[in-house]
Image: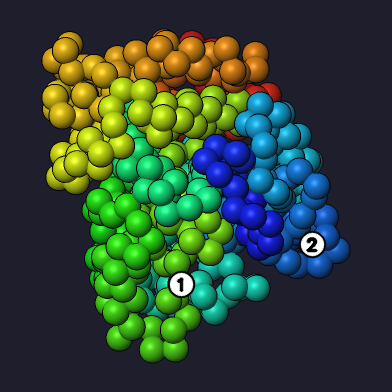
Amino acid sequence: MGFDGMDAEPLSLFAAYGVELEYMIVDAVSLDVRPTADEVFRAVAGEITGEYETPDISWSNELVSHVIELKTTEPAKSLVPLGDAFQRHVRTINDVLAGLGCRLMPTAMHPWMDPHREMQLWPHDYGPVYAAFDRIFDCRGHGWANLQSVHLNLPFASDDEFGRLHAAIRLILPILPALAASSPVMDGSVTGVLDNRLAVYRTNARRVPSVSGEVIPEAVFSRDDYEEVIFRRMYEDIRPHDPEGILQHEWLNARGAIARFDRQAIEIRVLDIQECPAADMAIVTVIAETLKALCGERWSSAAEQRKMASESLVSLLHATIGSAETAVVGDAAYLRQFGAAAEGRFTAAELWRRIIAELDVRRLLGAAERVGLDAILSRGTLARRIAGALGTNPDRAALRQVYEALCDCLVENRPYSPQAL
């Protein structure tokens, strides 16, 4: 993800970015999940390994055998070239998978996977870690075995920078599903929830609730406070289930954004993956620019941002998990953080349009990324487009038609348009 093992001086705010994209492997004909990630690595590395590194983008596997993750090999100084870089590697992996009768599928959840029957843990490399997760949390559920996301890693160089960045990230987490929701289908049904991935993610660690908390991180703005409020409780609560200490590391934290002090970075984890890298990188750019504005106190002071009540943020996140861009944002204290309190209330989509226009984000995007962002702003989140194409009670044939089209969007790096079916 770009910040591992850094020996140089810590990077300051927005000096670089680490981006991770996760995709599922499916049968090229049936689109059922296929746990063949190890064979992909064998084909390119000559052996089964969980990491395959190239100069720009590396491939890896985590937890389950039907998922491949692409990530920046080193911290990227600019987001601009990453869309094309990720797309090249998507095509390379699809070329390898073609020889195995498989292909990559985008979106944050497989539409009809039965994780209790089909999940296969990755048995190599970090196998003992994944086995410990499975023993404690039972990874056969959707919240572990059937979710693909985008992670954005942002650096900080000091405790002050950490506090500013953490405060800003807490503010935008609740409205990120209004841009990124892509999981309206689960167990073969259009559930009425647009971000099912986050809905199941919220409860996947319920046996030890302090592992994920309320997804919105607690209002802590220094390393010492984070260690005391979040890590200490989490490690104490997991210890009876993990006497060997296998899981007592920072990466156990499953909040929607997690502090990685070992990397001097915060990792945002609430983003559903889209239908193509251009759309993902458009969303990542919007997030980065919004966080720059918040950290720079464009609309509100850092002190005001830190006062935002967690309860309000959690409530808004629940609303956007359900209805994504049409969720109503009416909390005046929240809207003040974006200089928008005078208008009274917005849908989440309207708030994002206002932010994007004020920051002129489109000028920073390449042509493919602009098309991806415009699709979200004009036609709705990918989840809404998928649900609209499927209707309320789709059969397997309808699901296959839509998700095959989404697989084609990934190959061609273009947004999904239901009208194209």
- Residue at the image point whose x is 16% and y is 12% from the top: 342
Q: Quadrant of residue 278?
A: top right
Between 318 and 30, which is closer to the camera in this rendering?
Answer: 318
> Where does label 2 land, which residue?
42
Q: Quadrant of residue 225?
A: bottom left
Q: Using the image, determine if residue 292 lies above or below residue 202.
A: above
Of circles 2 and 1, the one toward us is 1
- Residue at the image point whose x is 28% and y is 54% from the top: 220
Q: Is residue 26 left or right of residue 320?
A: right
- Residue at the image point whose x is 43% and y is 39% from the top: 271
Q: Using the image, determine if residue 379 lies above or below residue 197.
A: above
Q: How many angstroms separate mark 2 from mark 1 (CA)?
A: 29 Å
Q: Which numbered marker is on residue 249?
A: 1
Expressed as whole percent of the image width and height from the top left, the position of residue 401 reads: 52, 28
- Indicate which disc, 2 or 1, sits on the residue closer to the N terminus: 2
Between 140 and 284, which is closer to the camera in this rendering?
Answer: 284
Expressed as whole percent of the image width and height from the top left, the position of residue 395 reads: 39, 33
Determine whether the residue tagged by mark 2 lies in a helix, strand or loop: helix
- Tell me the kind of residue under disc 2: Arg
Residue 393 shows in the view: no
Mark 2 burial class by Cα count in 10 Å: few <14, some 14-19, many 20+: some
- Residue at the image point whose x is 36% and y is 23% from the top: 298
- Tell me the kind of residue under disc 1: His
Residue 355 shows in the view: yes
